[in-house]
Amino acid sequence: MSFANKTVVVLGATGVIGSGAVRKYLDAGATVVGVSRSAQNLDALRERIGIGPSESFLGVVGDFVRESSAEEVYQSVTAALGGREIDHVVSVLGFAVVGNPPTATSLDVMRGALDDGLINNFLAAKVFLPGLKSRPGASYTIVSGGLAHMPPPMPGLWLATVKNAALNALSNSLASETAKDEVRVNTLCVHFGVAPVGGKQNQFGMPAESDTLRLGPAFLGVARGTQKGQIICLDSWATTDRIAAQ
Ligand SMILES: NC(=O)c1ccc[n+]([C@@H]2O[C@H](COP(=O)([O-])OP(=O)(O)OC[C@H]3O[C@@H](n4cnc5c(N)ncnc54)[C@H](OP(=O)(O)O)[C@@H]3O)[C@@H](O)[C@H]2O)c1
């Protein structure tokens, strides 16, 4: 399926995972709006993934830090699209915080970890999901991580376990809200390290046998697929390639 007439919004476009989704949607001919808090990061993204002048990429600067700023992001994205409706949203905001074990963690660190990985994705859904509800073929895909399903392998990773489990619960809740609507809400729950373009490790130093450009096609697979309300566990690159090929 070509995405030539489709509009895609990638929230967290400049990140390790978001950047691969941007590249692959552009390769498939989509108009892509990438959101970041920083114009410099968007310029660096253009360079890093080689976005050419003829490609339909629109950068929007904005921050999902509070309800009002999230609404501003939505208005900026719709203005950038000039009246075209949004077909697909990828919400891949924030990363996981590494810290101390739970009882040695300050409340500020706990709140910060949820702000930067859960709350921003929640605010994004509040402003972007309602407009997709009655859009035929629309999809809304959230990204979480496999630590959601296991005791943290190191005590300091517990915030990643909590954040990812909460993201999966948020996704299930959004899917429940939209069960009778056109839009398909799903989560890609990534169970391994993903490297930046050309790299070998993720931000935790976890080995990554492939980078974001191999993960990117999985977003297109979910967008053209039939899944609805699924937590899709990408537990290996073979599974990832299967989702990408659907
Ligand atoms: N990387 C991996 O190996 C891996 C593996 C499994 C799961 N995951 C999960 O995948 C998700 C994304 O990870 P990642 O590695 O892509 O993280 P990342 O490289 O840190 O990217 C995070 C993105 O979110 C954006 N962002 C963060 N807070 C924002 C806010 N308030 N408003 C607007 N944009 C905001 C950042 O944009 P700016 O900084 O440019 O503003 C950046 O584009 C996380 O849930 C992570 O736990 C990652």
Image (cartoon, rainbow, N blue to C red):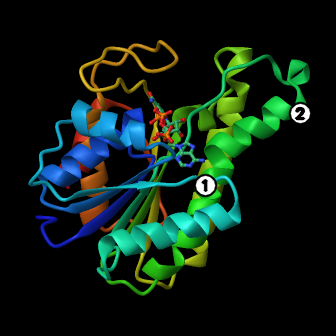
Q: Quadrant of the C terminus?
A: bottom left
Residue 15 in the image: above or below residue 218: above
Q: Residue at x 65, y 41 (%)?
A: 116
Give the Cα separation between the discs numbered 2 and 1: 21 Å
Q: Report the front residue among 115 and 226.
A: 115
Q: Where in the figure is residue 21, as x and y percent of width and height?
A: 30, 46
On the image, which quarter does residue 100 sit in? top right
Foreground: 232 or 59? 59
* Residue 225 shown left or right of residue 229 in the figure: left
Left or right: 90 as drawn, with respect to 43: right
Question: What is the secondary structure assignment of the residue under circle 1?
Answer: loop
Circle 1 residue = 64
Task: Say if disc 1 is inside 8 Å of ligand 1.
Answer: yes
**Kind of residue indicated by mark 1:** Phe
Residue drawn 34% across and 69% down? 80
Task: Answer with the quarter of the image where residue 89 lies.
Answer: bottom left
Amino acid at pointer 2: Leu
Q: Quadrant of the N terminus?
A: bottom left
Query: Residue 106's x, y, as percent?
Result: 88, 26
Q: Is mark 2 within 8 Å of ligand 1?
A: no
Quadrant of residue 196 within the rendered picture: top left
Q: Residue at x 89, y 33 (%)?
A: 107
What residue is shown with label 2? 107
Please provide percent x and percent y for residue 50.
Answer: 17, 36
Q: Residue at x 85, y 23 (%)?
A: 105
Judged by depth in the image, the label closer to the viewer, 2 or 1, is: 1
Task: Tell me if mark 2 has few (under 14), some (14-19) or many (20+) residues whose alpha carbon lies within 10 angstroms of its own.
Answer: few
Mark 2 element type: helix
Q: Is residue 221 above or below residue 198?
A: below
